[in-house]
Amino acid sequence: MATFKLNGQEIPFEPGDTVIRAAWRAGIEIPHYCWHPGLSVAANCRMCLVHVTSGRQMAMPVLRFDESKKAYVPDTKPKLQPACQLGAAEGMEVDSLSEQVKEAQSAVQEFLLLNHPVDCPICDQAGECKLQDYWLDHQHQLKRKRTEPVHKPKGVRFGPTIVYDAERCIMCTRCIRVCDEVAHDHTLDMRERGNKNEIVLAPGRELSHRYTLMTEHVCPVGALTSRDFRFKARVWFLKSSPGVCTGCATGCNTHVDFDPRYGKIYRLRPRDNEAVNKFWMCDDGMMTYQTAHERRIKSAWVGRGNNRQPALVTDALVSLVQGLQGVDRSKIGVVLSAQHTTEDNYVMARLASLLGTKKLYLAARGGWEGDDILRHADNNPNRAGAQHSASIIAGLTNSPEGPLETVEDLTQDALAGEVEAVIVLGSVADLEDEQLAPLRALPLVAAFGSNDGPLSAAASFVIPVAGWAEVDGTFINAQGMRQSFRPAVPPPAGVEPAWRTIQVLAAGLGLPLSYANVAAVRSDVFAPPASNSVRPQPAVGG
């Protein structure tokens, strides 16, 4: 691979790479504001200026103060070039640390801060603001301007999700390019010139497409803020864990930002993975963090309606085992979940196999409207993982359509008397409550879920299990890519991952189902030859 030198270090580059992209790929940051690896080059912030020391040198005339003559005299200085626009070339030598470069970066910083409000104590970007970071690295001096700064509109509502503060804006135009190049919707524009510049809505428009939160995410300062995250948390209190979005079958890689003091998730951010989601997420996907805490099932429940009573998990499982003793095991329906991890689904499928039932079904959310950007038409993160888990256990069903039937099929089988009891993983279903009446008519329906939903509402036993943000698990996306993630926050007290809780049920039924840890489950579910249908994807590392 061709290389060039950056500060004496050999940097490999691909055809068409710019200096800043090649450096970024090598893990070296050249200071920048307007450049983003997923967007076109604007080259308007001038923070990434570098000195090309090889080849024919370019110089520009300047007037420099001569102390001995006490006057300005003609001189020259190296002509710097923006690294975001400068194409990498074999043998090129680039300096991004010279005194001339540092002086230019300091001047750019001072220019951007001339009219910028020093409202860091109330700014949501405080703690992850490039203006703050680069001031410490490249300026180190107080503002010399003594006149009143230019005032611009503040707290402008761009749409249902985004608020704009024009005084903080440095006109990097990233937000405009996200709308144009990612969402393919020209919603934002720029008006005026110089220190009167500001971002505005296109005439008659509102920022309301499906990728509005990306406009806030790429903002390097505090000009754009999310109405959902606004004033809710300080980023220096937040920790981050690698996750996979539960919004749809694309499986966008995420950073799960949480406060460890409270075990609470505050937001999701896209985690770079050019093979899956590149640098982006849709709005609905970024808001799925709310499902980690909403309608949580924190204790077991036994009974239905007004007769439903809280119970300890251990007591509920004992009662469930007793209830299953008198049921023909071949007539027990087992429901996998397109929302739960592949490990949970595999252990549930193994339970079905040990019970000797071939009544295996799949519960999933109903579809949503996809697009050709990121949103998959299947708004379930792990349908492929559930199908994969079922396919490993041969002969689980006689359905010609595939290894798993639907919840609607389950209701029909319950009406026909072919299913007398049901064990459900998860709570979601693509049916309304009235359509689940055949399940409510069964004396025993046990739901192992983390959040309330149609299936848990129809159940006579509700057993709490850990949610997606509380487990070490794996999803398989629509491309067949296996993506693992780690727990961000702990589950409620006494609540375990579903695969562990299912094992407790199996032990009560006298069935040999036992795994020491999730790695043991994973080694089974992805063991050859089953793994031939799955392409491994190191999503934990991005």
Image (cartoon, grey):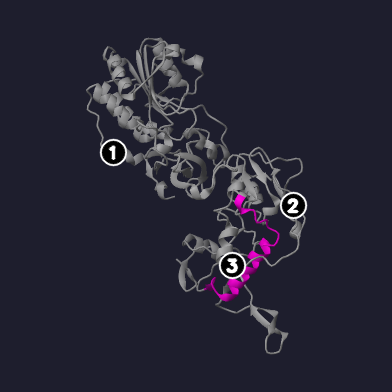
The residue closer to the viewer here, 468 or 36, is 468
Instruction: Give the residues drawn in magenta, as a range.
Output: 92-121
Mark 3 neighbour density, 10 Å: few (under 14) some (14–19) many (20 or more): few
* Amino acid residing under circle 2: Lys
Of pointers 3 and 2, the one earlier in the residue sequence: 3
Of pointers 3 and 1, the one earlier in the residue sequence: 3
Residue 311 in sight in this render? yes
Residue that carries the numbered disc 3 in the rendered image? 140
Q: What element carries label 2?
A: loop
The residue closer to the viewer here, 56 or 147, is 147
The residue closer to the viewer here, 112 or 11, is 112
* Amino acid residing under circle 1: Asn
The residue drawn where x is 45% and y is 19% is 457
State the image coordinates of residue 358 (x, y, percent, origin top left): 32, 21
Q: What element carries label 1?
A: loop
The residue drawn where x is 64% and y is 53% is 119
